[in-house]
Each structure stands twice: as structure tokens, then as C-alpha cells.
Image (cartoon, helix red, strand yellow):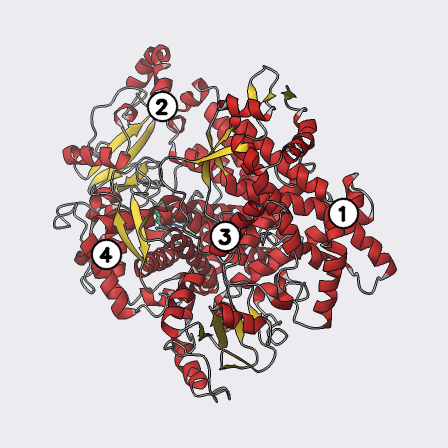
């Protein structure tokens, strides 16, 4: 028995009393009602209805004909399942049947039946419909929102593209589609995204997502109390209370959006939003455009316009992977009409007839609203010769009509071919309803579904996971969802559509114009450029570069020699891959090459190229380098921070020790190492820890971690627009906006730290940190130690450490670190250099403004943090070797493949077994120290037999005394 049956069962007592009363009351005067199955008192036919309703109604129609009647409690319901009867409803009877039944949801959620969907037929509804047609969903207004649809679809493509970078990979489309449609609608309505990245107000977005989820749950559940009001009473008003509470929250949320717009607190995009537009109409016609009317319009757009489109997309993709031939044909059409050089756009959809047939066939077999939205008669009428009294609920079973064997050959097969142009087949389907209450959003829905589906077909290859077809059973709910969310799909990007290619693809038109201009522009005067692979106009060699770049360059060097040149768009790039040529760069040409190319990141994240890492070679850079060498990273200052490094390493050891309490255990070192270095840096800079335990201000730490994560993501992604500025323009400044927003947050964060120190609100440790030191220098030389300079210095010191080690005396340890850096340099291509004048390398001409990338850091722009890095890496590695035994998990060697990001050469995740030396008691006893916990278990042993050979007893002693004091806090040493 279903949910509702629990309620029905409580009826048994009341049953007898009412049964007799109702059974013997005078029946309706009309004689010729549509045929009806046998019913029972009170419930009528409610007890025979099992979801999905459209299937239950289809079975009844097979027995009682295409027009039959039912009783839902005391309400008469007529169900229509033939095209001719439906036509009669929406032509002859259109006005009489243009009412809606008054259900509980309509009362509470739809502002007491006043929204467009729920309003009774009449002046108010007509007005709303007019406003919607002209002010909300008109062709003109939809066109102004095209950029939103493009942008959201582009984000979906990027997401899929990231997921399928390595070839076919499993993706879950249901959520992606629903997020897409919600974002499109909310950006149209309020200029806001509530799903995915770039969500401005996470808390507000959360509230919205929660409301949406709840509304979907109640929308889907039909409320039996609507038809049998006594059930609401038996239910103790539980369902009603829930709906009322939800409607209150929805109202508050929508009112909040309106108030925000009214007080103009919103960003740029919002000047052209539905709310903004409605508020401007409110000024001239305040009596009509009340806040409630506006809220109702937003609500309806969101409720009626999102899930319907998302569900249609899901059904369409399921059909395509179940019918690979259809998919192939759609792709062929796409290739012929649009090609692979550019991305499909909305106007293309009208030329893609097969794509449209796929959508029509999807809507035929899987209409998102299989019973449309219930209608109600406002007067007596007849349908198919039967009498239909006033206040009868009318349900049109569009789902059954779409599968009627009298109308369609092979009705349950998916055959888009049946919708041949000019044959009028599309007129036989009614997924958007018919007549005056038909869907006003059909145009918008077709645009969203057409462009999204077209883009997915164009940009990716799709196949099912495994042999089984995607399950096509429909679930319950107002919109007809799939029972199984669509996740058994694998997507792979088609060869030509790499990330950047999506952008390049928009180039086709501009291509020819620029190609000729660039191709025939005067060639550089240098005659003897380094050899170069064949290039193409505009892009140069950008299209042949596949990450990881250092490997791509290595392969090119095999063909073109150790000094070769490339063109990144309009920039000449020289790649140097031999030690002798590199030496030439950093000795003879050191000054010429001491420049840096001006990239977007440097502009926005490097204070307009003024930080040490980004500044052009010159007085400003020299000054920064001097300050860094003397005031920030000098031996003397590094020594004063020794305690910080010791403490952070000690914390790492403790963490590992806790993990390996029971012997060997699996650990993830990548995160630990990265947290260690960030903590060391931030304690030196500001006296604060942002990772692990003992974080003082969790919210501030969160902000910092978020910024770090984002900066890493953008740092890794090279921006093609740096080399082909027109791409920034085509991209709509999207990447740039993200970077600008990030840089703003970084600046605010750093300024916050400085201000905090200035007002001395910080703890003890902070008297000896970089910011305080800089602020004291600011007092004496305010013109040089400006806040911006200080922020730039903090920023630069956050760059990852790792360089040549020199833990004195541990020569073998030193060699291990050197060998690691030889094979796996952290910045495999260093940081790009740029020539500030003409020079030669290896006999080749290198013109001014050539970028140079090479595998070793030498010369005046070599890493200034080498000393600090040596200390951190040396001490950490030494301690790890000393304190733990290490083993791999399983037989396999740790995967040494490097990631694709620049600088991210660290393996993805080091999974190594660790083991405190507690298993080998003998060895430990020989060293003479075992650390036990309060229960007396051995938990940590500092040093082990193997290390005795390497370390002198003095070192072991020093280590013990260094750690024992703090270890005592946790464990009692023996
Ligand atoms: C694939 C997507 C969609 C489908 C299949 C669909 C289907 C329907 C259907 C069957 C109806 C009821 C017709 C009737 O009562 O006979 C309806 C009504 C409505 N739809 Fe859609 N719809 C979709 C998308 C949209 C969109 C994108 C919007 C707006 C943003 C929208 C707004 C509405 C409204 C406001 C009504 C109520 C109209 C009234 O009662 O006067 N729909 N839709």
C-alpha cells in the first residue's frame, strides 16, 4: 500500500456513517456522463489509481474508451485519451475548460491561486498571460538573454570536457541538466547563479537549493486531501503545515530578491533581469505590478520552466545512447550544417531538422507533463457527445495520445525519422498543451533544449556504460522523471574540441580577416630564427601543444634540436632544452633575458606586474630582490624562524605517528606536505596557521584555503587569451573576470592581515613575523615600503617551495633531494623569461620580446627562496626517514606520472605505508628510546637501526630532545 493508503485505512470507522449518506443522496441530473469503472462510496476511484497515473489511465481507456470519467472523492474527473477528443476540448470548449482546479498547493504556494499557472480563467489570468508574453517570454526578451544561455551551456561543456580529458569517462547528467536550467532561469530572473562555481553568496544559494528540493518533493506528491478534505483533518494538518511553512520560506526568499533589486545592491548583470524590468514597470503602474504579482511570476518561471526542460534533456540523451545510429545521423547533420570549426549557436538549431526531429520524438514518447496541467470546466459542456458538468476536472492523457497506434506506426519505437519536414507530424503531438492555457514557455524551452542537445552532440562522443540499454522506466512526479537518473553514460570529447578549441571554434569568421593580416605582415628582421615546426595562421603552434608541456617540448626538441622556436598566437617563443644553451642564456644573455612576459595572471594576481616574480627587470625589481634577500629570506631571518619549521615538522610527525599506531598504515602525503609548507609560510608572514588543528579563526582560514585552491587552479590553467587576445573577447571576459574577482579577494585578504597587524590585534608569535617587520620598515621609509609592496611580498612568498637541499653533513640525504629535483623539478619549465633586447642563443637570432622557457633556474632571476626551501625540505625529509619505516602499498611502484598542470609535477597522491619502528623492538632498544601512550602501548620510536648508520648518536639525541618535550604532551616517554 502506498503513502496515502495509511490515511485511507483510518477511514474505516467513518466509512459506514458517510457511505450510506452519500450513496443514497440524489445523483447528478445529467444522464450521459462518460463511462466509468465501478466505484466505492467516499473514495470513488481513488483506491484504484496506482502511479504512474498516465499508465493507469491508459489501461482504463483500453476498457472504457478514450473519454471516461472517475470520481476523486467528491470530484468528478474526466480523462481524455484521444487526439480528436482533445482537439474538441481545446477548440470548441477551450474557454469553458480554461479553468484550473483549486488545489492545496495552489492556495499555499501559488499565492492563493493568483499565479499564471493556477489562476482561474478571467481578467487577472489574461493580464498575467499578456505580461508574460510581452515582458517576460517575448522573442525580443528571450534574445536579450541569449548570452546567458550560451554561457551556461558553455560551462556545462567545460565541465564535461574536464571530466573526459583522459578519454571516455562516466558522467551523471541528470544533476548537470537540472543545474543548467535553474541557473539559466535564475540569471534571467535575478542575475544570479545558484549552482556550480562562481556562486556569489553560498548561503543564499544553499537556501535556494533547499527550497527547490522541497518544492519538487511536494509538487510531485499529489495530496489526497485535495479530493477528500476529511483526510487533511485526519492527517492532523501535517501535510498542510509543511506546505504552508515551505510557502512562507519561498515568499521570504522571493521578497528578499525583490528588495535587493529595489535597493540596487546587485551587480551589473542585474540591470537587465526580469525583476529589474518588473520593478521599472511597477513605478509606472504600481496598482498592477505589485510585489505579489512579481513574486508569482518569478515562482512560475522557476517551477514551470526548469525541471520540464531538464527532464526532456535527460530523456533525449538516454534515447540517443540507446540508439547509436540516430546519434551518428545527428552528428553527420551537425558536421554538414555547422562543422567542427565553430560551436553551434541558437540560430543554427532551426536548420538542424534531424536534431529537431529527435527533440519532437523525445517529447512524443516522454512528454515532461504527461497529463498536461489539470483543467477545470467553468460551465456545462459536452465532449465526444458525453455531458461534462460544471466544475469537472479534465485530464488530457497526452502520453497515451502520443502512443496511440491509430495515429502512429510502431508507436513505442524511438524513430525521429517519422517527423519529416512538411508532413505535419509535429502537429499531432501536444507536449506543451493546446488552446489558451498552453505553455507560454514553449519557445524558451525549445531554445534551451535545442542548443544544449546540439552542443552535446557536436562536442562529445557518447556511449553507454556496459552493454545494457539505459533504463527508460518513468518515475513519479508532476514532470515525468526517469526512475534511474541518467548516469550510465560515458562521454569523450571529439578530437577537435579541446578546452581551448571551444573558444577557437568561434573564430571561423574572424579567421580569414586576421589570417591574411598576420600572415602577410612584415616578418621579423632576424633572419636566423631557431628551427620551428610548421604552423598555421593566427594560432601559430598553439594547436599542437598538449599538456604536460615539458613532455611536448621534449618531443619537439628530438625533431628540431635543443633550441627551437614556436609561435603562441602572435608571440615568438624560444624553447631551450640543453644545458649549454641554458648556460648561455643565464651568463652571456642573463640581463637580456631577465624580463618576464606580461601575462594576464601577472596583471591581476601580481599587482600589475609589480611583484618580485612578475616585475620586469629594472630598478623596481632590483629593489624588491634586495629587500627580499636582506629583510625576508636572509640567513639571519630564516634562523629566527627555525622554531616554526621545527614545530610544523613535529606536528607532521605526530600526525604520522598517530596514523601508524598499529603498525604499517596507508597515508596520503601530498596534502600533508602542502599544508606543512603553507603553515610554515603563513606563520613566518603573519604568525598564523590556516591548516590542521589549532587554527584560531576557522572562517578566516577557510577563506585563505579557498583562495589558495582557486589560485592553484588558475595558476595551472594557462590562458590562451594571453597569446591570442581576441579569445578574451570571444570568451566574453569570463576567464578574466574570474581572475579579477580572485585578485580582488586576495588583495582584501592581504590588506586585512596588514591592517590587523597595524592595529596590533594579533597574538604573541606575531611580534616576530614578516608583516610586522615590513610595517616597522614602513615607518622609516614609507615611500618604499607601501602596503602594495608588502602585499606583493607576501604573495610571492606563498609560491611553493622546493629547491636544492643542503642539510649540512647529511650528504646522502642531500643527494636524494638533488636526484629528485633532477628527475622531477617542481617548475619543469621554470618561470617564462622574456628577452628585453636582441641577442643570440646557440648561434640563432632571438629577437626582442621573445619568451624563453628552459629546464634550469640560473642567473639573476633564479629562485630567491632556495635557502628556505633547502631548510624545509631537508629537515622534513630527514625527519621522515629517521622516524618511520616506509613501504609501498602493495607490489606496485608508486605511479610517477606527472600531472598536466604547470608546476604540478608532484605525483597525484603518494600512498605509502608508514610504520613507527615499534615492530622491531630489538632495533629500537638499541637506540634506547620508545615512546608510549598513557595505556603503555608503544606508539612512536624515534630513530631505528638503519638510521644509526647514517646519524651520529648526537643527532639522534638532539632530535629526541627537540621533539620529546612536545611529544610528552601526547605520550609519556620511557
Ligand atoms: C520542455 C519543457 C516544457 C514542457 C514540456 C512544458 C509543458 C507545459 C504544459 C503541458 C503545460 C500545461 C498546458 C495545459 O494546461 O494544457 C504548461 C504550462 C505552463 N508552462 Fe510549460 N513546459 C515547458 C517549459 C516551460 C518553460 C521554460 C516555461 C517558462 C519559463 C514554462 C511556463 C509555463 C507556464 C507559466 C504554464 C501555465 C500556463 C497557464 O496556465 O496559462 N514552461 N507547460
Instruction: Compute the Cα span from label 1 to label 3.
Output: 33 Å
Q: Nearer the N terminus, badge 3 or badge 2? A: 2
Say which of marks 2 and 4 sits in front.
4
Q: Residue at label 3?
A: 819
Q: Do the residues labelled 2 and 4 touch (CB within 8 Å)?
A: no
User: Is residue 348 toward the left or the right of residue 650 in the image?
Assistant: left
Q: What element carries label 2?
A: helix
Q: Nearer the N terminus, badge 1 or badge 3? A: 1
**Farthest right residue in view:** 780
Neighbor class of circle 3 (other Cα within 10 Å; few <14, some 14-19, many 20+) is few
Q: Nearer the N terminus, badge 1 or badge 4? A: 4
Work out whether 688 lies above or below 332: above
Instruction: Compute the Cα span from label 2 to label 4.
Output: 40 Å
In the depicted view, which residue is nearer to us: 307 or 105?
A: 307
Kindly tell me whether mark 2's CB lies below 8 Å from ligand 1.
no
Q: Nearer the N terminus, badge 2 or badge 4? A: 2
In the depicted view, which residue is nearer to us: 619 or 559?
A: 559
Residue 720 percent location from the top left of the image: 48, 67
Instruction: Compute the Cα span from label 3 to label 2.
Output: 68 Å
Q: Which mark is residue 769?
A: 1
Residue 663 percent location from the top left of the image: 48, 25
Residue 350 percent location from the top left of the image: 31, 66
Amino acid at each position: 500500500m502506498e503513502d496515502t493508503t495509511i490515511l485511507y485505512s483510518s477511514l474505516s470507522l467513518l466509512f459506514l456513517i458517510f457511505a450510506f449518506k452519500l450513496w443514497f443522496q440524489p445523483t447528478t441530473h445529467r444522464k450521459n456522463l462518460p463511462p466509468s469503472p465501478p466505484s466505492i462510496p467516499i473514495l470513488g476511484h481513488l483506491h484504484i489509481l496506482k502511479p504512474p497515473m498516465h499508465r493507469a489511465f491508459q489501461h482504463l481507456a483500453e476498457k472504457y474508451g478514450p473519454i471516461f470519467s472517475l470520481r476523486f472523492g467528491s470530484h468528478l474527473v474526466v480523462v481524455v485519451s484521444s487526439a480528436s477528443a482533445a482537439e474538441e476540448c481545446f477548440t470548441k470548449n477551450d474557454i469553458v475548460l480554461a479553468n484550473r482546479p483549486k488545489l492545496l498547493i495552489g492556495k499555499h504556494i501559488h499565492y492563493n491561486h493568483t499565479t499564471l499557472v493556477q489562476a482561474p480563467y478571467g481578467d487577472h489570468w489574461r493580464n498575467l498571460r499578456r505580461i508574460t508574453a510581452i515582458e517576460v517570454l517575448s522573442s525580443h526578451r528571450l534574445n536579450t538573454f541569449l548570452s546567458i544561455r550560451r554561457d551556461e551551456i558553455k560551462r556545462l561543456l567545460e565541465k564535461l570536457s574536464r571530466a573526459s580529458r583522459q578519454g571516455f569517462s562516466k558522467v551523471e547528467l541528470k544533476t548537470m541538466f537540472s543545474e543548467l536550467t535553474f541557473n539559466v532561469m535564475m540569471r534571467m530572473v535575478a542575475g544570479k547563479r545558484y549552482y556550480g562555481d562562481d556562486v556569489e553568496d553560498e548561503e543564499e544559494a544553499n537556501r535556494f537549493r533547499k527550497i527547490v528540493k522541497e518544492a519538487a518533493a511536494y509538487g510531485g506528491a499529489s495530496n489526497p486531501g485535495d479530493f477528500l478534505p476529511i483526510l487533511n483533518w485526519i492527517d492532523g494538518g501535517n501535510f498542510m503545515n509543511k506546505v504552508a511553512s515551505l510557502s512562507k520560506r519561498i515568499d521570504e526568499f522571493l521578497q528578499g530578491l525583490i528588495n535587493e533589486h529595489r535597493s540596487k545592491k546587485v551587480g551589473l548583470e542585474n540591470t537587465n533581469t526580469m525583476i529589474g524590468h518588473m520593478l521599472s514597470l511597477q513605478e509606472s503602474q504600481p496598482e498592477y505590478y505589485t510585489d505579489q504579482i512579481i513574486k508569482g511570476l518569478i515562482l512560475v518561471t522557476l517551477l514551470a520552466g526548469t525541471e520540464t526542460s531538464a527532464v526532456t534533456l535527460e530523456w533525449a540523451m538516454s534515447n540517443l545512447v540507446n540508439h547509436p545510429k540516430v546519434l551518428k545521423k545527428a552528428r553527420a547533420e551537425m558536421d554538414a550544417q555547422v562543422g567542427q570549426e565553430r560551436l553551434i549557436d541558437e540560430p543554427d538549431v532551426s536548420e538542424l531538422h534531424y536534431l529537431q526531429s529527435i527533440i519532437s520524438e523525445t517529447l512524443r514518447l516522454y512528454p515532461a507533463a504527461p497529463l498536461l496541467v489539470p483543467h477545470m470546466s467553468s460551465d456545462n459542456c459536452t465532449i465526444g457527445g458525453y455531458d461534462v458538468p460544471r466544475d469537472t476536472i479534465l485530464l488530457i492523457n497526452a502520453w497515451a495520445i502520443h502512443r496511440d497506434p491509430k495515429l502512429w506506426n510502431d508507436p513505442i519505437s524511438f524513430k525521429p525519422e517519422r517527423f519529416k519536414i512538411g508532413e505535419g507530424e509535429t502537429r499531432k503531438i501536444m507536449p506543451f498543451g493546446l488552446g489558451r492555457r498552453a505553455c507560454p514557455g514553449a519557445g524558451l524551452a525549445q531554445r534551451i533544449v535545442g542548443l544544449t542537445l546540439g552542443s552535446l552532440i557536436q562536442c562529445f562522443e557518447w556511449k553507454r556504460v556496459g552493454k545494457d540499454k539505459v533504463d527508460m522506466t518513468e518515475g513519479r512526479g508532476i514532470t515525468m522523471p526517469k526512475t534511474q537518473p541518467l548516469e550510465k553514460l560515458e562521454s569523450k570529447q571529439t578530437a577537435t574540441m579541446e578546452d581551448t578549441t571551444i573558444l577557437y571554434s568561434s573564430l571561423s569568421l574572424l579567421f580569414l580577416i586576421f589570417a591574411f593580416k598576420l600572415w602577410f605582415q612584415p616578418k621579423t628582421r632576424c633572419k636566423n630564427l631557431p628551427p620551428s615546426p610548421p604552423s598555421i595562421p593566427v594560432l601559430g603552434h598553439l594547436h599542437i601543444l598538449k599538456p604536460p608541456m615539458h613532455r611536448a617540448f621534449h618531443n619537439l626538441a628530438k625533431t628540431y634540436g635543443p633550441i627551437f622556436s614556436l609561435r603562441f598566437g602572435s608571440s615568438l617563443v624560444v624553447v631551450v632544452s640543453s644545458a649549454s644553451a641554458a648556460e648561455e642564456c643565464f651568463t652571456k644573455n642573463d640581463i637580456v633575458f631577465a624580463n618576464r612576459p606580461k601575462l594576464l595572471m601577472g596583471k591581476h594576481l601580481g599587482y600589475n606586474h609589480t611583484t618580485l616574480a612578475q616585475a620586469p627587470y629594472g630598478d623596481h625589481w632590483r629593489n624588491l630582490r634586495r629587500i627580499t634577500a636582506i629583510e625576508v629570506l636572509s640567513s639571519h631571518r630564516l634562523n629566527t624562524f627555525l622554531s616554526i619549521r621545527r614545530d610544523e615538522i613535529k606536528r607532521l610527525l605526530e600526525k604520522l605517528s598517530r596514523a601508524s599506531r598499529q603498525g604499517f598504515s596507508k597515508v596520503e602525503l601530498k596534502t600533508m606536505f602542502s599544508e606543512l609548507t603553507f603553515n610554515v609560510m603563513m606563520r613566518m608572514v603573519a604568525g598564523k596557521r590556516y591548516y590542521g588543528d589549532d587554527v584560531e579563526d576557522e572562517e578566516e582560514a577557510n577563506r585563505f584555503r579557498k583562495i589558495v585552491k582557486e589560485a592553484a587552479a588558475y595558476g595551472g590553467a594557462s590562458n590562451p587569451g594571453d597569446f591570442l587576445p581576441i579569445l578574451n573577447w570571444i570568451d566574453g571576459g569570463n576567464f578574466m573576470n574570474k581572475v579579477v574577482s580572485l585578485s580582488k579577494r586576495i588583495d582584501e585578504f592581504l590588506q586585512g592581515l596588514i591592517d590587523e597587524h597595524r592595529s596590533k590585534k594579533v597574538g604573541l608569535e606575531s611580534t616576530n613575523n614578516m608583516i610586522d617587520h615590513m610595517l616597522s620598515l614602513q615607518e622609516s621609509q614609507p615611500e618604499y615600503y607601501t602596503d602594495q609592496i608588502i602585499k606583493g611580498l607576501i604573495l610571492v612568498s606563498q609560491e611553493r617551495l622546493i629547491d636544492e637541499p643542503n642539510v649540512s653533513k647529511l650528504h646522502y640525504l642531500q643527494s636524494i633531494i638533488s636526484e629528485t629535483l633532477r628527475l622531477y623539478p617542481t617548475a619543469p619549465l621554470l618561470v617564462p623569461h622574456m628577452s628585453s633586447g636582441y641577442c643570440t642563443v646557440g648561434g640563432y637570432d632571438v629577437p626582442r620580446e621573445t619568451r624563453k622557457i628552459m629546464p634550469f633556474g640560473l642567473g639573476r632571476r633564479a629562485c630567491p627562496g632556495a635557502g628556505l626551501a633547502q631548510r624545509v625540505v631537508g629537515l622534513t625529509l630527514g625527519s621522515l626517514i629517521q622516524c618511520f619505516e616506509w613501504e609501498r602499498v602493495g607490489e606496485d611502484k608508486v605511479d610517477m606520472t606527472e600531472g598536466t598542470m604547470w608546476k604540478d609535477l608532484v605525483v597525484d597522491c603518494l600512498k605509502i605505508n608508514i610504520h613507527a619502528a615499534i615492530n622491531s623492538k630489538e632495533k629500537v632498544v638499541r637506540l634506547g628510546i620508545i615512546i608510549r601512550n598513557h595505556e603503555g602501548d608503544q606508539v612512536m620510536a624515534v630513530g631505528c637501526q638503519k638510521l644509526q648508520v647514517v646519524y651520529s648518536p648526537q643527532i639522534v639525541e638532539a632530535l629526541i630532545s627537540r621533539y620529546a618535550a612536545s611529544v610528552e604532551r601526547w605520550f609519556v616517554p620511557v
